[in-house]
Amino acid sequence: MLKQIIAAQSAKAPPPSTLLPRPRPLMREKEQAAYDEALKRMEACLRNGSTGLDLSNLGLTHVPPEIGYLKALDSVFLQNNLLTTLPPEIGQLEALTGLYLANNQLTTLPPEIGGLKALEDLYLFNNQLTSLPKEIGQLNALKDLVLEGNDALGLPAELLQRVWTQSGDVPASPQDILAFYFSNKAQQTPTPAAPLDRYAYDVFLSVKSQDYPHARVAEAFLRKAGLRVFFCEQELPEMGNSDYFDAIDNALEGARHMLVVTSSREHVMSQWVKKEWQTYLNEKLSGRKSGNLVTLLFGKMTIGDLPLSLRQHEARNGEDLASLLNYFRARGTQ
C-alpha cells in the first residue's frame, strides 16, 4: 500500500529499487505488533499529507526503514520506546526540524543523521549512548541538543544545563556541547603505539677476519645511514670462548637481515662464517625470521663462486653500497 501511495504522489517516481518492500527484522509477537502499528501510522501520514509523525509509546524495537519515503515530515516523535538503533533511512528526511528520541535504549546514532540539514531540535535524553558520530557536527541548523542521561558520553552536567530566564528557558549551545565532546574524545583516544621491533639489529654482518677491511667500509656506510649493524669486531671486545659464542648466537637471533661479506669461496665456506649464514637460513626457512640474506662480493668473487645455498639469495657487488642500503630499507629496518 505504501509503495502505491508514494508512486502516485511523486512527481518523479524514485528508482524501482527504492520502492521494493523492505525486509523485516526478526521480532517477537508483541514487537511485531508495534512495528505493524508504526507502518500503519506512516501510511496514514503519507495519505493525509501530514508533516508530523507520532510513533511514541508503542514499544518499538525497530523503526521501519520505510520512514525514508516520508520526505515531507518536519517532526518525528519516537520517545518512550525500546529502540537501540535507528535505520540509516532516517537521514533522508531533509525537511525534518524536530526529532524526539528520549527514553529509549540507543547506544549510537547512524552517520546518516548528518543528512538532516534542517534539524533544529534533537532530543536524546535518557538513552545509553556511548558515542556520537562525527557527522552530527554537520547539523548546522541545530538549536537544541538534549543529551542528559547518557553518562557514557562524559559530558559535564553544567554544560548540558538549560538556563531559565523570564522569557523562558535557553537551551545549552549544541555547538559548545559537540565541541567539548569531540575535543575530549580526541584527548582520550590513545595514539596507536608503534609496533615493537623484536630485532636489536637491522643487519648481522658475517665475515671472515681476512675480509674485515671490506666489512668495515660496509658497516660504516650502513651505520651512517641509520641502520643498526652487528659487526663482531666492533661489538665484541676480548671475551672467553663461551661468552663469545653466546654473544654471536644472541646477535643472530636479534638481527633482521644478514649481510655476508666475502672476497673468496674459501672465506665464505670457513667454519664460523658458514655456521652463521646456515643458522640464519634455517631460521628463515622455519619462519622465525622475516628478513633477507645478502652476500656482498669483493675482488674477483662472482655469484657463480658462491655455494648453492647462498646463490639462491641476493648477491651484490661490494662497490654498490647505495643499492644495498635501498634493498634493506625496502624490506624493513628500524
Image: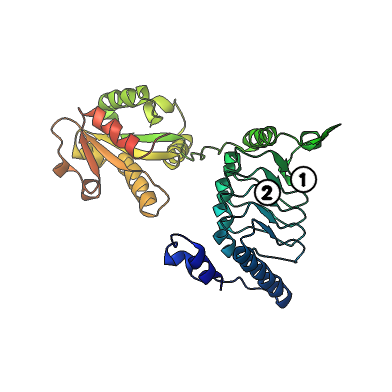
Locate residue 37: give its quadrant. Answer: bottom right
Query: Amino acid type of disc 2?
Result: Gly
From the top left corner, tell me how far across and down residue 12 is, in percent: 43, 60
From the top left corner, tell me how far across and down residue 113 is, in percent: 59, 49
Task: Give the labeled residue for mark 2.
Answer: 98
Q: Nearer the viewer, mark 1 or mark 2?
A: 2
From the top left corner, tell me how far across and down residue 25 is, in percent: 61, 70
Q: Nearer the viewer, residue 264 or 54?
A: 54
Quarter of the image for the N terminus: give it: bottom right
Q: Nearer the viewer, residue 190 or 9?
A: 9
Residue ID at (70%, 55%): 106
Judging from the image, what secondary structure is the residue with disc 1 in? helix
From the top left corner, tell me how far across and down residue 304 is, in percent: 14, 44
Q: Nearer the viewer, residue 169 or 281?
A: 169
Task: Give the labeled residue for mark 1.
Answer: 151
- Side (left or right) of 317 relative to 150: left
Query: Which of the two labelled residues, at mark 1 and mark 2, occupies the earlier sequence position?
Result: 2
Check contact, mark 1 vs mark 2: CB within 8 A: no
Query: Amino acid type of disc 1?
Result: Asp
Residue ID at (73%, 75%): 30
Quarter of the image for the C terminus: give it: top left
